[in-house]
Amino acid sequence: MTRILMIEDNVDLAFGLRNNLEIEGYEVRLAHEGRAGLALALAESFDLVILDLMMPGIDGLRVIKSLRDGGNRTPVLILTARGQEEDKVRGLRLGADDYVTKPFGVLELLARIEALLRRTQPAQPAGPPVRFGDVVVDPAARTARRAGVETPLAPKEFDLLWALVEANGAAVSRDTLMNRVWGYGADILSRTVDTHIAELRRKLEPTVAAPVHIVTVRKVGYRLVRDASAHD
């Protein structure tokens, strides 16, 4: 049975979500503050962590950082309130895999959970290392090195980057990237792709404000330009 750890300080919300998840066949453990949730995540094995960012004790951002710094790669779905755009981005930078903004519908949450679980063990990318600019992407090791120094990428960041690599310079729509990397499409409204693209640019582009490799294709999506001199 798939095991989910939910760390949420709103007791009513947590019990309501647990009830819905158990109806769907998941086993759910609850923690109502960050420190207890982190202890559970470290002590037991889970397939997914659902994590509220705003909690007493230690907040969700510190929970994510502690998990990732300790090598725990369990997928994390963060819950954020409207207006917490900065915290949402910080959570993704620290290694969260996706987010849902409160208030949200149960069906949306279930769709995102199912997508994350399907992508827990993504198919291993195949092929030789690929270079663009001073970046070398190695699909076998799932690493990216910039100027010879490894640049840490979250799992979904690497999957997104490799999806662009495999397009071989062609434009890829946001809907295609959502389906390819996260497992759901246009019926789920999300800025997840744009947020992860911004992180890839921050880590891999020479100038974040003027990207020359991970470029926007207006009204379509994104494409990867290996030769920056060919970028128009």
Image (spheres, grey):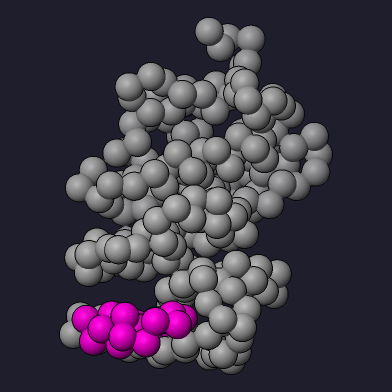
62 left or right of 160 in image: right
144 left or right of 48 in image: right
* Residue closest to the eye, 91 or 128: 91
* Residue closest to the eye, 17 or 13: 13
Residue 196 visible in the current orientation: yes
Image coords of residue 93 (percent x, y)? 60, 53
- Image quarter for residue 34? bottom right
133 left or right of 27 in image: right
Determine the residue located farthest toward the front in the rendered image. Answer: 83
- Image quarter for residue 120? bottom left
Q: Residue at x 45, y 82 (%)?
A: 9
Image coords of residue 209 (percent x, y)? 63, 25
In the displayed structure, 184 sits above or below 211; it is below
In the displayed structure, 7 sits above or below 199; it is below
In this picture, which residue range is highlighted in magenta? 1-20
Q: Quadrant of the N terminus?
A: bottom left
In the displayed structure, 199 sits above or below 65; it is above
Magenta span includes 11: yes
